[in-house]
Image (tube, grey):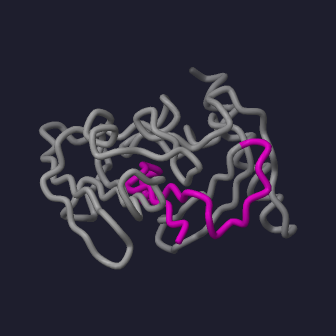
Amino acid sequence: MIRQVLTAFAMMLLVIQSYGQGHSTEISAPYGSEFTINGLIIGGPAEYSDADVIAAFGQPDAVEYDEFGYTYVYNRDMTKKPDGYVQRSNHSAEITLPRIPGPILSVYISDRGFVINGHIEVGDSISKVYDLGGKFKTNDYGDGDGGILWCPPGRSDDWIVCPEFTYNENGIIDSIYFWSY
């Protein structure tokens, strides 16, 4: 446990140092080189049907259609909230596909039950993000709140299309979002 904490701390220092110098740091990836949630690849090129989304995330409370496509809305109630976690949205998750079948091009998650690369979810310590490997860029939102943009290993994606893990002043992940439109 202490070794994991020290490794995560060292990785955060590398990222903070790199961010201040205008570049990112890349770390090897023990959890794969794609961004996945509950096993589905996010951001394409994989395309999914309605049945695929329901199999991975469960029955949505609503499916809304607008100019961005089909958004699966989940409103789950947490019975046991992790220490330091404060939910900031009235939706547990929103997952958007531009068409059906189609790629998942937008995700917003603010609750547990949506597992990133089989390893991390809302309510975990922000230090777990560095376990994913790849490139990282930090954002300071003030009052101890912040975010870490993550680019999977081997990718040279523009930071605007990388998922961000936001965290609160307690260092607990309170949302994960990705927007690739």
Residue 111, horizontal then vertical, whole percent: 29, 48
Closer to the camera in the image, 142 or 149:
149
User: Residue at the location (70% across, 48% down)?
Assistant: 12
Up the image or down, 77 lies above or below 65; here it is above
Up the image or down, 2 lies above or below 87; here it is above
Q: Tell me the magenta residue range.
A: 153-181
User: Residue at the location (68% across, 66% down)?
Assistant: 159
Quadrant in which residue 6 is drawn: top right
Residue 154, horizontal then vertical, whole percent: 79, 43
Q: Please check the rendered image and state whether residue 76 is part of the magenta-colored stretch, yes or no.
A: no
User: Residue at the location (26% across, 56% down)?
Assistant: 72
Quarter of the image for the N terminus: give it. Answer: top right
Q: Is residue 50 left or right of residue 105?
A: left
Q: Please check the rendered image and state whether residue 176 is part of the magenta-colored stretch, yes or no.
A: yes
**Image label count:** 0
Q: In this view, does 37 lie to the left or right of 73?
A: right
Q: In this view, does 68 lie to the left or right of 22?
A: left
Closer to the camera in the image, 111 or 84:
111
Q: Is residue 52 left or right of residue 15?
A: left
Residue 131, horizontal then vertical, whole percent: 63, 34
User: Residue at the location (52% across, 34% down)?
Assistant: 117
Closer to the camera in the image, 54 or 123:
54
Residue 49, horizontal then vertical, whole percent: 35, 45
